[in-house]
């Protein structure tokens, strides 16, 4: 009789009473909370990695797009002369903001990561490098190469095109990978919540039968399960997103080192994404539970 009274109260009362249809504890609750929290944690990191990689590729691409390098390989007696000729030619080229020859110390610093600090640069036939900074729409690369070929035969122009294209392609692929990761995570959440909802509905088959006897509709029973599992997923995802955001705050900033994984965090308005993760997780759980509840309730008729 008490079960019937509680069921009638749940059927005619508030949503809090309806929650009694669903077991408040057990492995289904733990499974839903853990799955939602873990997947939200991974989603935050997937978003941060995708955005950080995109920022890095964009930064490198912009820097390379505004700069070019002229390499002069000539005999020792002619290198200084050809360097002066190249600088004079570049100073007369439209679209070139500035051009300067790198010092021996700067070239030593460029080669140091590969050959070490004790490289005898003066004794090696190292080409002279000239840094070119563009302005406006830049210079005419084809025309400049023809002039260099005629006046500075030892010069080779590198406008960094071959470096920019892979970076742009990599940024696009990383963003696509991030989107695919989010979809896979959402699918995993939906699968876990569906399994938990199926288990809870099957475990409460007798309660569901009693509710039907006292007049409860399948819509009311389904709403009770949907509400409980949606709130569980929302709570777990909120904890997971908070943990992921806290872990990102502990990562080194981009200003501390120049490594690839530095700056792995959200910047500016991108911090809204961790706030959206729990809401999207709850939406996935809502849809998954609603579909599972209606299917299982149909099978229990």
Image (cartoon, helix red, strand yellow):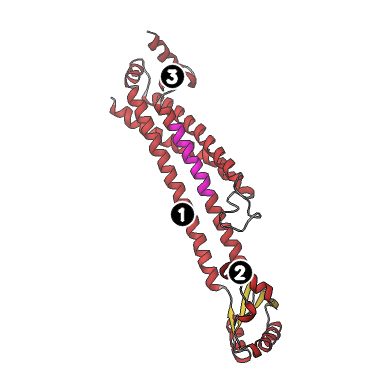
Q: Quadrant of the N terminus?
A: top left
Q: Which residues are magenta?
A: 32-47
Q: Which residue is mark 1?
A: 177
**Residue 150, image x and y in percent?**
61, 91
Which mark is in front, 2 or 3?
A: 2
2 or 1: tag closer to the N-terminus: 2
Q: In the displayed structure, does residue 182 sit left or right of residue 261?
A: left
Q: In the displayed structure, does residue 101 sit left or right of residue 159?
A: right
Measure how far apart labels 2 and 1 are at the Cα level. Answer: 34 Å
Name the residue nearer the viewer: 300 or 114: 114
Q: Which residue is mark 3?
A: 20
**Residue 48, image x and y in percent?**
55, 49
Query: Residue shown at 49%/57% (left/top)?
Result: 174
Q: How many residues crowd around disc 1 within 10 Å: few (fewer than 14), some, or many (20 or more)?
A: some
Residue 273 is inside the magenta segment: no
**Residue 254, image x and y in percent?**
63, 54
Query: Residue shown at 55%/68% (left/top)?
Result: 164
Q: Quadrant of the C terminus?
A: top left
The quadrant holding residue 222 is top left
Q: How many residues crowd around disc 2 within 10 Å: few (fewer than 14), some, or many (20 or more)?
A: few
Q: Which mark is residue 112?
A: 2
Residue 38 is inside the magenta segment: yes
Q: How many marks?
A: 3
In the rendered image of this protein, does residue 94 appear above or below residue 31?
below
> Which SS class for mark 1?
helix
In the rendered image of this protein, does residue 192 appear above or below residue 168?
above
Measure how far apart labels 1 and 3 are at the Cα level. Answer: 42 Å
Measure how far apart labels 2 and 3 are at the Cα level. Answer: 70 Å
1 or 3: tag closer to the N-terminus: 3
Asked if the residues shown at circle 2 and circle 1 are in contact, with their CB atoms under 8 angstroms apart, the answer is: no
> Which SS class for mark 2?
helix
């Amino acid at each position: 009789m008490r079960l019937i009274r509680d069921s009638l109260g749940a059927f005619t009362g508030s949503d809090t009473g309806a929650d009694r249809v669903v077991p408040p504890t057990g492995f289904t609750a733990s499974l839903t909370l853990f799955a939602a929290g873990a997947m939200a944690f991974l989603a935050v990191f997937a978003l941060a990695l995708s955005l950080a990689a995109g920022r890095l590729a964009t930064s490198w691409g912009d820097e390379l797009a505004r700069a070019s390098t002229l390499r002069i390989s000539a005999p020792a007696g002619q290198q200084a002369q050809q360097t002066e000729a190249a600088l004079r030619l570049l100073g007369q080229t439209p679209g070139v903001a500035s051009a300067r020859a790198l010092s021996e110390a700067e070239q030593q610093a460029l080669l140091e990561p590969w050959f070490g600090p004790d490289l005898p640069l003066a004794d090696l036939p190292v080409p002279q490098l000239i840094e070119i900074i563009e302005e406006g729409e830049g210079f005419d690369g084809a025309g400049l190469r023809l002039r260099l070929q005629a006046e500075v035969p030892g010069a080779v122009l590198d406008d960094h095109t071959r470096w920019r294209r892979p970076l742009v392609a990599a940024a696009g692929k990383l963003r696509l990978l991030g989107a695919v990761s989010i979809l896979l995570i959402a699918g995993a959440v939906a699968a876990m919540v569906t399994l938990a909802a199926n288990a809870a509905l099957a475990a409460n088959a007798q309660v569901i039968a009693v509710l039907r006897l006292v007049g409860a509709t399948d819509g009311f029973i389904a709403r009770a399960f949907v509400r409980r599992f949606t709130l569980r997923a929302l709570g777990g995802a909120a904890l997971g997103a908070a943990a992921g955001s806290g872990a990102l705050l502990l990562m080194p900033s981009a200003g501390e080192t120049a490594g690839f994984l530095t700056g792995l965090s959200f910047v500016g308005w991108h911090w809204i994404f961790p706030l959206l993760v729990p809401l999207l997780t709850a939406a996935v759980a809502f849809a998954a539970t609603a579909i599972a509840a209606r299917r299982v309730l149909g099978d229990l008729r």
